[in-house]
Image (spheres, rainbow, N blue to C red):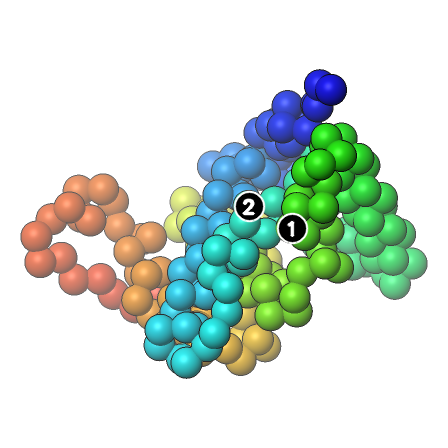
Amino acid sequence: MTSHFFAYIDKLRWVIRWGLKRNTVPENVKEHSWDVATIAHALAVIRNRVFGGNVDVNAVVVAAIYHDSVEAVCSDVITPVKYHSRQIREAFKEIERTAEKELVAMLPEELKEDFSRYLVEDNLPQEHQQLIKMADSITAYLKCQMELKNGNMQFSKAAESIGERLKSYEQPEIDYFLRVFAPSYDLTLDEILAPGVETAPVLKEVN
């Protein structure tokens, strides 16, 4: 059997995020998935090591890698459109469920069960879903901050609403990540590599 699965999800490199906004730095779903996976990994480790959690870190990372795979089928739809009304939200959820099934169906029979654990959102433990959504929100917020720093005010309202979303989670892992890691996102490479560099607090509205 020949499977098109990985060739298909490789097309995520051509699915552009934030499609209805002008971007100074374009972002595709494939690179976004890397960002979400690495930050979800960090949040899971922080939860275990700093806040006494017992989450399966590796399972969170694998699920995060595949969290937007359905967009190879149904493309990216920005949040204000997807959540414009209950009917639209429910319709897109059904589309995404169908896309999950289509992706799993592309796999060899002997691999389907293993992959469906991560490709089908409803198969994920609630704690894993939460950590991935938190990481997704952090990456979106950092993207907004980068665009604002580049003078692109089209991201101002998005930055505000995503900041409120981060606060609504009320999870200490988010505060930890934003306090320890987020300030460096504002630095240039030269500043990051400079010895003894101090980073200023950022994302004040989230704290």
In this figure, what is the number of numbered marks? 2
Q: Check disc 2 and report its element: helix, strand or loop.
A: helix
Residue drawn at (47%, 47%) of the image: 35
Residue 52 position by quadrant: bottom left
Q: Secondary structure at mark 1?
A: helix
- The numbered dot on residue 82 is none
Q: Which residue is mark 1?
A: 118
Q: Amino acid at mark 2?
A: Ile
Q: Nearer the viewer, residue 199 or 56?
A: 56
Give amino acid for label 1: Tyr
What residue appears at the point 67 percent right and 60 percent down from the top-left corner? 124
Residue 160 higher or lower than 150, as above or below: below
What residue is shown at x 33% (from left), y 70% (from top)? Answer: 179
Give percent across and percent down for residue 139: 49, 54
- First in sequence: mark 1 or mark 2? 2
Residue at image coords 47%, 74%: 54
Tell me if mark 2 has few (under 14), some (14-19) or many (20+) residues whose alpha carbon lies within 10 angstroms of its own. Answer: many
Q: Residue furthest front?
A: 110
Residue position marked by numbered label 2 in the rendering: 65
Answer above or below: position of 162 versus 121.
Answer: below
